[in-house]
Image (spheres, coloured by chain):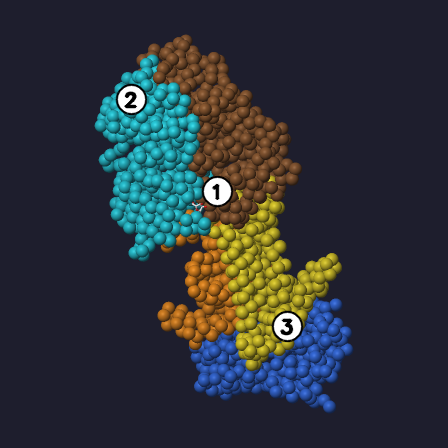
Chain colours: A yellow, B blue, C brown, D cyan, E orange
């Protein structure tokens, strides 16, 4: 095990950064992910197809293209970038926040799909029952739909996290590969594969990344099992 | 505002230079302007990032084209561009291969390949691929192997194709071939068969960091030269002090 | 204390054109499978928006398609017991029960968790998930959940169908108390004449999406022709009586009625309390002379008003006993043997045992403490 | 023609320790909500594997935990009607009905789609999806689906609970024919004594996971103490009779029994066919002299065997009428008034109208053509 | 529109190849995808966690690493490659089949998740009912579970297809970038983004790729709606 954990400070930073980026990407995409999934599952409005397409875009586009589009729109000179900096004081360009944004967006279609599938599986008769008991639609959603969607939310979250642990094309294109700020594990791995003799190092970092993801995966499965057990045989 | 860590010089460098540049960075610390923060990625990505306001002080490109791309947009500090390093392209084969070749005009590369493919960096996108194509053209064998290429995303991937025996031959940088135990060099392309392989470097126009020029200088120093040469590069700048 | 419904709606091949005014406390919807009972109740609850219609409960307009009024379901303050229980699978029984309370203003809560739980016998189930309940247990929890929302209108869709008689007998009095002591109107879907006769003040008979008959329970229950052939034995007359005295020795209660005194098993009701009794037509014998040496205790003198043949074997004998209508169902053979004709003075004989709990409904009064 | 079950199983806090031998054609499982009826039936179907037990149907061992035998559900050839209908939501009603046929060898198919569809009145629903059916419609389709699998053992879990009386009355004879004409044993869960008495050859009374009583229906139905208080009026005696002749004029059938002749509404059965009748205890009057001028047609002479008090108000009078046991439920007051004592010769009086379709079960014979 | 469709023969080939590769990748991953999803949703066996981890691996690993692993195992000299060539005569290396393999594997975790979520949502009581009617478990699966899982299968298929339309890192690493054989749209786009001034061409191909994916997406939504309508209000 020592060889596995015998990391340079930069590598350590990359590990920590990756966990941070993946966690933030996952957490921050959850609320919009749930919202969009709900819209797509239940909504009937003009432009639904467009939103659906937009959500899937990061899946379809080569990551480099996504990264480049992010650079153009969320970069220092991009309109979205200026907007966020002005109104929220959030800067994405060449910051770890940008890496999180890129990872979140790359994992977004996966998350939305999982949650949407789960929402579509919820028995609307239960929602009707909650409505007759006096719960406002928003509360019906929070107390009935959402808990019953939990398996999908957990699946979506873990997909988003795992994707973030592996995402590299969009990230490196958008926020580059600056140690300690935007150099996530996959970026570090990429760099190592680009130089002679880097394979062992790349392998080591890959293993670390896999281990982190597997721990997250196992945790998510346990969570989902608990959520599922509660519905058992109903 | 997006400067990384307090006052460190930020270098955007082609990924293939990581080994050498990491060593140089150490050597240039603390009195050579280091330690610099070095972001390694594809030259294309780095150039576009600089175009979009990346906090880079120094750009090290794997070819002249992306440097020119920035220079044309006035994103390079005038007069700072230096042609720093040179390299060679070689023909490699898996280490247990029996293939032999004498690289000269018209040599029968196609026959050497047989049914196999020639691993090479993307001939339109990857610098090593572009040089390789130029060399094959000037040796007048391009047309005979054009249909037998396996173009890779980057030169390292091309090398891997050869190392795993997937491709019987490949064209890669000498610097890469040296360190890969799975391949052996069976010939070097003559210098005059392709445009000179040059890694240029320059300060960006937006750089405000005074240490940047110090670091740039350090990259051209003797101690740096040794480190670059240790990785197989040829240093193009004249020796200083 | 009223519900008024007027609906016109199509779903698939089925068209529902129904309306009724439930001016009493409990309106029963009665009708065969597929006649539109659940559909109607869903519209009252706001789960289905009818093509056209007007629904009013207790003076509140819940729906008026012409005026563009549609009160959303969560603001209707309705307690609905679904035909399928529809418990929340992710909550414990306890949370299911408490769900509606969250949305009821504290001042308007009249249902108490403990007494409802005890009544329904679901105390041991509180920590379970609905998935692990038996069919009847689920239904009981569903009833509790609706009650505990302290609704202003209670809709019950065959709430007792999957319960055994013992359980039914326990819950029925509770529904009676709800009906009488709280002032919530109840709309109650049932297949059982016995339940309807006991509970309902008004009955709406549905058939194929249309109202076949509606009116006061006593009137509807007498009209045996409205009932399916198999249920006619269950039909009969309703008598409004009051408690005259109790006979503690024999554990009986003597009810006063226009037809005379009627002895029933001891009721738990004070002197003077009104009691409605149902006398099934098939439980009534007719005699031309006052019988002797017979175990039946109730003999009511009356005059035959009409005799209606019903099939070849059966006739219905309508009597007037001191102003109260009474219905007997006997064989044509007996009619001929006894020479029964309208105008004849006869004795109607009813066993005390016919008045089991299913057939006596005590009318409660005053404020309720559930 | 037999089912034998011996089970020991725990689920959560509930432990089921039950066993019975159903040697007759239809074994009824009777018991209050939560007593373990569904659990037991699930084990017979192979849906739940009990901790320990042995199940045999028609000589086939379906389960023997000791011998390690567990026949998987799909090889048990069982038709199960679930308490919740469990129709396949992605198939039309027609496909639902036809589902089981796919898996039945052609030679063993005895149920015919058209007649089942007609019987259940689901013809107009065939192209619908289950999601768009009413509660009763779903249940009817579920019954049809189980029948059409031409099972060798039919398990029915409260199949008629959500049906109106008219529908029930239509389906009950069909179940009778199934019972008598095909040789499939049936296990039938029900809350209704009337259903049980009419259909069952054997009854198993469950209470809290234990068998409280089991035996021939006639024996169990007489033991009023086994019934919940509210159901006792429904209890009574079962008489095995046969058709003696028909009285076409009055549309009656005269049944011969050890107790004497009994007149019931015209039955559709040939002379000599055995008919089982249920005489509810509360429908029987006792007289000390043969009554005259009374509409009741059936007067059976007998001797009082025993008188059992039941509560303060009620007594049960057990009579022997020519060898046939008869049970009457009368008030204590009447008993005292008539001086009824064991040994006294009395007359039991039963109205013909008490024998409605719910109380007469014709025993069919021969091969069936459904 | 003319500028959009005014493609070089190589670009046309890339478009056709991409559709072929994505379709084949999707179709061939469906059966194993359904199987693995079933195992993960229902199975209780030793090593389930391992299989689950394995399925997620392509999500976690940087695509280059996945490509490299494919090269090692399915390449001409790799054990799996040799196996397939010997027994089935299928060669992956430098063939479009290899591209399809890479795309299929990259999309596999997405497909499996979607199908698994749907399987977990199926009411097992319905399966029990089918069992009592005499259906063998395999037939129960085919006639009850599978149809009820349809929304998830459609979602999984479209995710796999979309992913294949965008996948490039693993593909190019595994089977290189050979025009007319393994140069899919994303590879072509990548090449263009690496050349100064290639942006316009990259944009054009990106648009084509997006259009193809959107058509597939819309078709899948329509299919899913039809599948869903059949279960309406149950
Ligand atoms: N999965 C389970 N885990 C624990 N307890 C259970 C489970 N399923 C049922 N029970 C309990 O077992 C008992 C018997 O349930 P069962 O469904 O057999 O009752 P039942 O006789 O069919 O009742 P009903 O007439 O209400 O349908 C009930 O008390 C119920 O709460
Ligand atoms: N969503 C629907 N689309 C089309 N027809 C429907 C729909 N829901 C119900 N129906 C039909 O409408 C009719 C009335 O259904 P409803 O559920 O109101 O009957 P019900 O009186 O409650 O019957 P039950 O006593 O069987 O529950 C039935 O014939 C049913 O098939
Ligand atoms: Mg209904
Ligand atoms: Mg049950």
Is the same chain shared between marks 2 and 1?
no
Q: Which residue is mark 3?
A: A13
Of circles 1 and 3, the one toward us is 1
Q: Residue at position x 40%, y 24% from top?
A: D331
**Which of the image's four quarters has the N terminus of chain D?**
top left
Q: Find numbered disc 1 in the image and state the secondary structure of the residue it sits on.
A: helix
Q: Find numbered disc 3 in the image and state the secondary structure of the residue it sits on.
A: helix
Are the residues at dot 2 and dot 3 in contact (C-beta closer than 8 Å)?
no
Q: Which residue is mark 2?
A: D345
Of circles 2 and 3, the one toward us is 2
**Which of the image's four quarters has the C terminus of chain D?**
top left
* Image disc number at residue D192: none
C259 shown above or below C57? above
Name the residue at the top extreme: C343
Label 1 lies in ligand 1 vicinity (Cβ under 8 Å)? yes
Q: Which quadrant does ligand 1 occupy?
A: top left
Q: Closer to the camera, A152 or C28?
A: C28
Q: Which residue is mark 1?
A: C138
B180 shown above or below A101? below
Q: Residues within 10 Å of mark 3 (few under 14, many from 20)?
A: some
Q: Residue at position x 49%, y 15% from top?
A: C258
Name the residue at the bottom extreme: B241
Calculate the distance from the C-alpha at mark 1 to the C-alpha at mark 3.
55 Å
| Residue B37 visible, this angle | yes
E181 shown above or below A29? below
Choose top left, top right, bottom left or bottom right for residue E198. Answer: bottom right
């Amino acid at each position: 095990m020592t060889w596995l954990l015998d990391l340079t400070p930069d590598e350590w930073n990359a590990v920590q950064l990756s966990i941070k980026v993946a966690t933030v990407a996952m957490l921050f995409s959850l609320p919009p992910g749930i919202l969009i999934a709900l819209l797509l599952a239940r909504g009937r409005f003009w432009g639904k197809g467009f939103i659906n397409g937009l959500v899937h875009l990061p899946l379809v586009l080569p990551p480099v293209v996504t990264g480049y589009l992010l650079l153009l729109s969320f970069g220092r000179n991009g309109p979205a970038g200026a907007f966020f900096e002005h109104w929220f004081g959030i800067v994405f360009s060449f910051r770890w926040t940008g890496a999180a944004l890129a990872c979140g967006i790359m994992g977004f279609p996966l998350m939305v799909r999982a949650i949407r599938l789960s929402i579509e599986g919820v028995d609307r008769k239960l929602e009707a029952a909650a409505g007759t008991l006096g719960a406002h639609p928003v509360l019906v959603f929070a107390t009935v739909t959402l808990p019953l969607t939990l398996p999908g939310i957990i699946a979506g979250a873990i997909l988003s996290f795992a994707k973030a642990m592996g995402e590299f094309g969009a990230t490196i294109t958008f926020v580059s590969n600056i140690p300690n700020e935007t150099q996530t594990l996959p970026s570090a791995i990429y760099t190592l594969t680009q130089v002679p003799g880097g394979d062992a190092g790349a392998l080591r970092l890959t293993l670390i990344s896999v281990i982190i993801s597997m721990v997250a995966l196992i945790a998510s499965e346990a969570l989902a099992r608990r959520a599922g057990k509660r519905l058992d045989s109903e | 505002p997006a400067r990384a860590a307090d006052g460190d010089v930020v270098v955007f460098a082609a990924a293939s230079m990581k080994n050498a540049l990491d060593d140089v960075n150490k050597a240039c610390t603390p009195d050579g302007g280091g330690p610099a923060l070095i972001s390694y990625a594809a030259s294309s990505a780095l150039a576009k990032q600089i175009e979009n306001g990346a906090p880079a002080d120094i750009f090290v490109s794997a070819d002249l084209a992306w440097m020119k791309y920035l220079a044309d947009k006035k994103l390079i500090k005038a007069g700072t561009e230096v042609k720093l390093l040179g390299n060679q392209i070689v023909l490699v084969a898996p280490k247990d291969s029996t293939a032999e070749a004498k690289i000269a005009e018209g040599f029968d590369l196609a026959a050497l390949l047989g049914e196999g493919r020639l691993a090479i960096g993307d001939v339109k996108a990857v610098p090593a691929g572009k040089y390789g194509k130029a060399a094959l053209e000037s040796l007048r064998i391009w047309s005979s192997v054009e249909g037998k290429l396996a173009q890779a995303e980057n030169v390292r991937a091309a090398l891997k194709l050869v190392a795993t025996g997937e491709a019987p031959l490949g064209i890669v940088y000498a610097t890469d071939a040296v360190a890969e135990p799975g391949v052996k060099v069976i010939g070097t392309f003559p210098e005059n068969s392709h445009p000179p392989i040059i890694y240029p470097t320059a300060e960006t126009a937006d750089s405000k960091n005074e240490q940047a020029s110090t670091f740039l200088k350090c990259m051209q120093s003797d101690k740096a030269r040794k480190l670059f040469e240790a990785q197989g590069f040829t240093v193009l700048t004249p020796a200083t002090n | 204390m009223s519900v008024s419904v007027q609906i016109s709606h199509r779903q698939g091949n089925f068209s529902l054109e129904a309306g009724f005014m439930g001016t009493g406390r409990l309106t029963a919807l009665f009708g065969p499978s597929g006649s539109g009972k659940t559909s109607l109740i869903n519209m009252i609850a706001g789960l289905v928006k009818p093509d056209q219609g007007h629904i009013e409960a207790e003076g509140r307009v819940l729906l008026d398609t012409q005026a563009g009024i549609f009160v959303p379901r969560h603001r209707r303050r309705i307690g609905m017991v679904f035909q399928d229980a529809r418990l929340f699978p992710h909550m414990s029984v306890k949370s299911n029960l408490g769900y509606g309370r969250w949305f009821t203003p504290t001042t308007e809560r009249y249902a108490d968790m403990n007494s409802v739980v005890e009544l329904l016998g679901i105390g041991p189930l509180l920590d379970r998930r609905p998935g692990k309940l038996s069919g009847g247990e689920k239904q009981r929890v569903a009833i509790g959940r609706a009650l505990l929302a302290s609704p202003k209108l209670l809709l019950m869709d065959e709430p007792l169908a999957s319960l055994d008689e013992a359980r039914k007998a326990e819950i029925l009095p509770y529904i009676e108390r709800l009906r009488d002591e709280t002032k919530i109107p109840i709309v109650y879907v049932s297949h059982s004449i016995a339940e309807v006769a006991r509970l309902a003040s008004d009955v709406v008979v549905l058939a194929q999406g249309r109202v076949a008959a509606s009116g006061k329970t006593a009137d509807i229950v007498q009209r045996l022709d409205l009932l399916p052939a198999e249920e006619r034995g269950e039909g009969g007359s309703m008598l409004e009586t009051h408690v005259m005295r109790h006979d503690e020795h024999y554990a009986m209660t003597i009810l006063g009625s226009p037809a005379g005194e009627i002895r029933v098993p001891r009721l738990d009701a004070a002197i003077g309390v009104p009691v409605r009794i149902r006398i099934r037509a098939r439980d009534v014998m007719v005699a031309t002379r006052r019988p002797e040496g017979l175990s039946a205790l109730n003999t009511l003198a009356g005059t035959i008003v009409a005799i209606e043949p019903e099939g070849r074997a059966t006739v219905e004998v309508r009597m007037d006993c001191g102003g109260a209508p009474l219905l007997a169902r006997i064989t044509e053979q007996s009619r001929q043997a006894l020479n029964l004709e309208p105008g004849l003075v006869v004795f109607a004989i009813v066993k005390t045992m016919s008045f089991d709990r299913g057939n006596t409904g005590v009318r409660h009064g005053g404020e309720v403490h559930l």
